[in-house]
Amino acid sequence: MRGGSVVPGGSVVPGGSVVVVGDVLLDLDVHGTVERLCPDAPVPVLDVTGEVARPGGAGLAAVLLAGTGVRTTLVTALAEDGDRVRELLAPTLDLVAGPATGGTPVKCRWHSPDGPLLRTDTGSGRPADEFGAAVRTGLRRALDDAGAVLVSDYGRGVTADPQVRRMLADAVAAGTPVVWDPHPKGTDPVPGVIMTPNAKEAAGALGLPGGDPVGCAAELRRRRKSRAVVVTRGDRGAVLVTASERVAVPALDVTGGDPCGAGDAFAGRLAAALAAGASLPAAVQSAVETAGRFVEAGGAATVRCVEGRWTQVGAGVSERAS
């Protein structure tokens, strides 16, 4: 594990690099005004005033990390129409990209001044057959220098690639902390990782409608042969379960905000803290605090690239083309 340190209060001084492995999306927020209904259907007409583009999925987790000064490498699959995503990512981190099919996954949210109107999803972004071979050398080099790894699974298939899985298992065997943020449509983690499901995902992975987070975490850790399971609980903080301890970490007292992207902020900070040499309980504490501040500042909707660095710029920021 490479160098770094944790200062009092759980904040992290960037030290070891973090490798993010997972599915990248393109998030678009289209803003406008509504003054009339469509003449041929009772739906609002949005007069567009601006658009904001940012990396989504594993891309959001990676740029948030890089924006805090952590040396970050992102390993993902990009389709032939992925130039816009590349441009958003390129200034801030090292990118190892293999080919994808089905077009760039785009989540477009349409907003009026009164709130969201609609979300449209396009593209599948599935890794091509040659994806593993294409990223093998770059991923291996990044893992050799990594203080920690974050697997950001958004169910598109990057984490299902056999070569990627073998290299992640090798990283675990070498003692590198591997944080695995799962997805209901994703693949099972390799053994020995630190899983970070939310409470619904933890119960769902066990085939349960719900349940005690501690009990779910313990059973999930046993079934997946994980080093630890951290169940995030929104405004109730998180629960850490290992073979020898159960730790409940309370959330920050947050007023308002937007939870979109909080899981990415949490998992990224957890990986960065571990890369910097923090103990697992201290890393979870740091991640809970980071996620709380992220939510309070307005969530993913307030993330912008400012002078080559992705950061939150505060709720209520004006929209413009990007």
Image: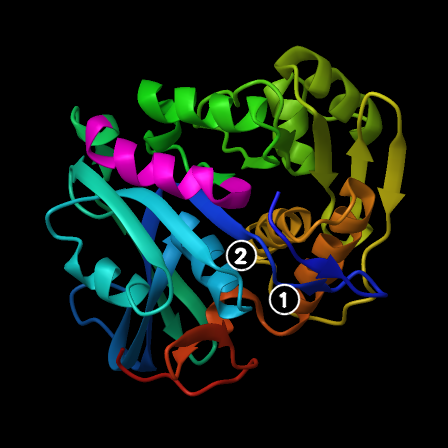
Where disc 2 sits, the SS reads loop
Which residue has dot 1 on it? 294
Which residue has dot 2 on it? 261
Q: Give the CA distance from mark 2 to mark 1.
A: 8 Å
Residue located 71% across and 30% down the image: 229
| 24 left or right, relative to 45 | right
Q: Amino acid at mark 2?
A: Gly
Residue located 53% across and 23% down the image: 189
Q: Position of residue 29 (x, y in %)?
A: 35, 68
* Quadrant in which the C terminus is drawn: bottom left
The rendered magenta stretch, by its main secondary structure, is classed as: helix
Residue located 58% across and 72% down the image: 298
Q: Is residue 141 magenta?
A: yes
Q: Quadrant of residue 33?
A: bottom left
Q: Is residue 310 magenta?
A: no
| Label at residue 268 | none
Of the numbered discs 2 and 1, the one sitting upstream in the chain is 2
